[in-house]
Image (spheres, grey):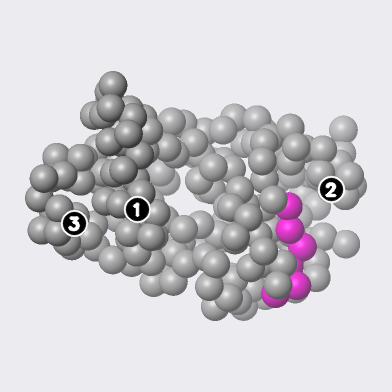
């Protein structure tokens, strides 16, 4: 029986997408944008900020390494708020229904820079509905490190066998499952709703 549910945030409850900035900066140059993502401001680089590296340090590091890309590199965090597309409303509605059922304790486990997370906290009221939140940038560790999952389990006294984790990143889901946590790999709000129903976690 599931007693506790842990949500990822970006891609599940919040629409965050760098394309909202870089489609404009690289308008008509899709190959340059792809190169930028794959070789300049990469996912690995971004995740170091999620794990606590200061944004200014990260930006200066890349500008020194790739001065010809200075403008888009500086735009990554300089225009970061433009990457927030808003709440993924159908998932927020599922979250609300789970909360109002009062059957579960609800938590957030997110890879997010401690410097940008306050923006989301101010912008999205539903982030205050959780019984607890664990933010990678504040803890200096991130998914999929086993220690990060263990941190939320220990902090809130959660039993992996009765805890459900929802994330849109298969890598993160696999890491949680390896620790005995029940998981749903999120692909869409509709798919999430169906899986919650299949597990008798969501009532009509």
**Residue found at the far top of this picture:** 28
Q: Could you tell me residue 39's position as x and y percent?
A: 30, 52
Closer-to-camera residue (146/43): 43
> For this view, does 74 lie left or right of residue 202?
left
User: Is residue 105 visible in the rendered structure shown here?
Assistant: no
Q: Could you tell me residue 78's position as x and y percent?
A: 20, 42
Circle 1 sits on which residue?
42
As measured in the structure, the alpha-carbon distance from the residue carrying label 1 to the one carrying label 3 is 10 Å
Circle 2 sits on which residue?
201
Q: Which is more foreground, mark 2 or mark 1?
A: 1
Of the numbered discs in the image, which one, if any, rests on residue 62? 3
Q: Which of disc 2 and disc 3 is earlier in sequence?
A: 3
- CB-based contact (under 8 Å), mark 3 and mark 2: no
- Where residue 112 sits, quadrant-wise, is bottom left
Closer-to-camera residue (130/178): 178
> What residue do we see at 63% from left, 68% from top?
175
Residue count near mark 1 (Cα–Cα under 10 Å), binned few <14, some 14–19, many ≥20: few
Residue at disc 2, secondary structure: loop
> What residue do we see at 86% from left, 41% from top?
197
């Amino acid at each position: 029986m599931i007693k506790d549910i842990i949500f990822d945030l970006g891609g599940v409850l919040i629409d965050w997408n760098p394309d909202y900035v870089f489609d404009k900066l690289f308008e008509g140059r899709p190959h340059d944008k792809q190169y930028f993502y794959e070789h300049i401001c990469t996912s690995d680089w971004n995740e170091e900020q999620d794990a606590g590296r200061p944004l200014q340090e990260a930006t200066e590091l890349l500008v020194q390494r790739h001065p010809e890309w200075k403008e888009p590199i500086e735009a990554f965090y300089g225009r970061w708020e433009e990457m927030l597309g808003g709440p993924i409303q159908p998932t927020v509605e599922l979250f609300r229904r789970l909360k109002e059922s009062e059957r579960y304790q609800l938590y957030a486990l997110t890879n997010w820079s401690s410097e940008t997370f306050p923006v989301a906290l101010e912008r999205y009221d539903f982030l205050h509905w959780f019984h607890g939140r664990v933010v990678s940038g504040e803890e200096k560790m991130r998914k999929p490190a086993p220690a990060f999952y263990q941190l939320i389990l220990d902090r809130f006294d959660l039993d992996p066998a009765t805890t459900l984790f929802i994330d849109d990143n298969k890598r993160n889901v696999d890491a949680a499952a390896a620790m005995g946590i029940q998981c749903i790999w999120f692909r869409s709000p509709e798919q999430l709703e169906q899986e919650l129903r299949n597990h008798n976690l969501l009532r009509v």
